[in-house]
Image (cartoon, helix red, strand yellow):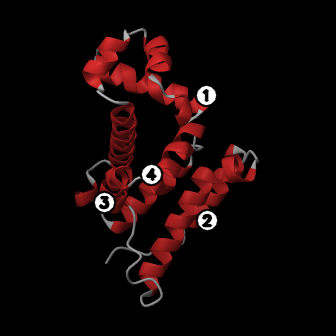
Amino acid sequence: MRTNKKTQILQAIEEIVEKSGLSAVTYESVSQASGLSKSGLIYHFPSRDDMITDLHRYMAADWDDRLEQIVGCPAAEATPAQRLRGNLAMAAHRATRSDLLVSLDALDHPVHAQIWREVLDKWNPSLDKVGEDDDATARYLVQLVADGLWAGDQLNLVTTTQAQKQALLRAAERLIPDDD
């Protein structure tokens, strides 16, 4: 399948963020990385903010697509246990620098946060009944384990071996409440 120009540009932007951070995303750097002219970039992204916002959309859609592939159905059709197992499977893949920087960027920008909320709210358990309902509490705890496994190596400056990560994932999976 042929990659369209906008996707090609977004992939180049993600690579720039991975190597040099969000502040390195400029028309010049994206033009150089993508091989497109600045005027070609402006056609797709009238402003730098548009580039960053569309990067969030691109990465959030990719997250959603990968979870759907892992689980085998859209979030709306999956059970709570299936969604959690999907999140644990995603945790088996180490967060990249661009993953973390884009996640942190969303904290300061409501538009970017909303892009991620639309995906994460579909797949992640709700915090609403934590502390009141044992299953809700267990589900949220497993989600926190998944999040920690995903970002933990980067945050703790360690490298979890595949065997260690698999052992932790199996232990977390045993905590998932059965679907009723």
Determine whether label 4 and label 1 are within 8 Å by CB. Answer: no
Find the distance from the CA under tag 4 to the CA under tag 1: 19 Å
Find the distance from the CA under tag 4 to the CA under tag 3: 17 Å
128 lies left or right of 29: left
Find the distance from the CA under tag 3 to the CA under tag 1: 30 Å
| Mark earlier in primary sequence (3, 2) | 3
| Mark earlier in primary sequence (4, 3) | 4
Residue nearer the viewer, 178 or 146: 146
At which x and y percent is residue 165?
65, 51
Q: Is residue 47 above or below residue 110?
A: above
Q: Residue at x 73, y 53 (%)?
A: 156
Find the distance from the CA under tag 2 to the CA under tag 1: 34 Å
Asked which secondary structure carries label 4, the reply is helix
At which x and y percent is residue 16?
53, 26
Determine whether label 3 and label 2 are within 8 Å by CB. Answer: no
- The residue type indicated by label 3 comes to Lys
Q: Which residue is mark 2?
A: 171
Asked which secondary structure carries label 3, the reply is helix
Label 2, residues with CA under 10 Å away: few <14, some 14-19, many ≥20: few
94 lies left or right of 62: right
Residue 97 disc label:
none
Residue nearer the viewer, 96 or 170: 96
Label 3, residues with CA under 10 Å away: few <14, some 14-19, many ≥20: some
Q: Which residue is mark 1?
A: 19
Residue nearer the viewer, 157 or 135: 157
